Image (cartoon, rainbow, N blue to C red):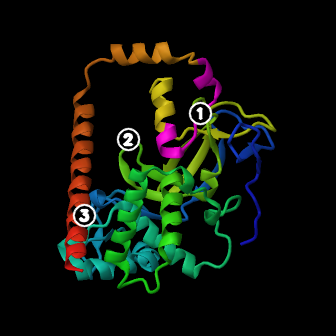
Amino acid sequence: MKNEGIEGTERFLSPGRGRGRGLRAVRHFAVGELVFACPAYTYVLTVNERGAHCEHCFTRTDDLSKCGKCKQAYYCNVDCQRGDWPMHKLECVAMCSYGENWCPSETVRLVARIIMKQRVTTERTPSERLLLLKEFEAHLDKMDSEKEEMNQADIAALHHFYSRHISDLPDDQALTELFAQVNCNGFTIEDEELSHLGSAVFPDVALMNHSCSPNVIVTYKGTAAEVRAVQEINPGEEIFNSYIDLLYPTEDRRERLLDSYFFMCQCTECTTKSKDKAKMEVRKLSSPPEPKEIQSMVHYAKNVIEEFRRAKHYKDILFSLEHYH
């Protein structure tokens, strides 16, 4: 695929301090208008939603059919199963081999799929009209020892769960960069109720810089990302997304951005702190949660506990392997 760009937008060098490249409008976008849609370069359904959502299109339905081999992946129909097979076959074989001991993290699963996709993809994909995945920032020079340790644990897990099924994995230096790129540029796919469905990479969406007063919002339709204007955008204006929850006051937002994305936000919202007082008041005056909200919190807590259990499980496996060798 040639670099055809995205109609109505262009990649440019953003003038903001430390921003680097960015995305700007070359025509007017009204509030609510779709700026662009981006299919995922690759993606994974979270393990906790298996059986409830199709692995290929993420549709939620009660009438799903399971994979006849691993019996853990579920699909809408034969077309979805065939469409997912180039990626699922990697996990299918591994899950059959490891059984209940198969427990790589979602990031490890996503990176394994990226490696497989890169091996069979020679041209620019529809997800990379403006930014190639290999252009992602890794910020290796800004990682602290804790993040480096987590990165090494992910690399060890990738080798443990996939080396038998992916021949000639990239060397550790390349994997270190790839995991760092995914951690800085990956996206969480959510449903309409903001429940976590999976993880993905959307290169063109990752091109947008952050603002705590964004003019677009990213939503998801199946496994595709949709970028819509939430403010009027005029030709020549930069298109900004928010990387974090905006309900937090300035200092909290800046801390989160610095920890996850390695920059100190200098947007107008952060420099003026104009909405901090109102945000604090809203948090103080928040009414008691509704039963549905409590149910959502419990569901979220269960997911976190499950992820922790899985992470601890594969940490134990790695510990045993180290002592075995």
Are dots 3 and 2 in contact, CB under 8 Å? no
* Nearer to the camera, 104 or 142: 142
Q: Which residue is mark 2?
A: 193
From the image, give the main secondary structure of the stretch colored magenta. Answer: helix
Question: Mark 3 Cα within 10 Å, few/some/many (few <14, many 20+)?
Answer: some
Q: Position of residue 10 (x, y in %)?
A: 77, 50
Disc 1/disc 2 C-alpha distance (Å): 28 Å
Q: Position of residue 294 (x, y in %)?
A: 23, 33
The three-letter code of the residue at mark 2 reads Glu
Q: Secondary structure at mark 1?
A: loop
Q: Position of residue 296 (x, y in %)?
A: 27, 39
* Nearer to the camera, 273 or 58: 273
Q: Secondary structure at mark 2?
A: loop
Range of the magenta residues?
A: 257-272
Question: Mark 2 Cα within 10 Å, few/some/many (few <14, many 20+)?
Answer: few
Q: Which residue is mark 3?
A: 315
Question: Mark 1 Cα within 10 Å, few/some/many (few <14, many 20+)?
Answer: many
Q: Which residue is mark 1?
A: 265
* Nearer to the camera, 248 or 289: 248
Relative to 319, is 169 above or below?
below
Quadrant housing residue 158: bottom left
Q: Position of residue 31 (x, y in %)?
A: 65, 33
Q: Secondary structure at mark 3?
A: helix
Relative to 283, is 16 above or below?
below
The residue shown at (48%, 26%) is 251
The residue shown at (51%, 70%) is 173
Count of numbered tags: 3
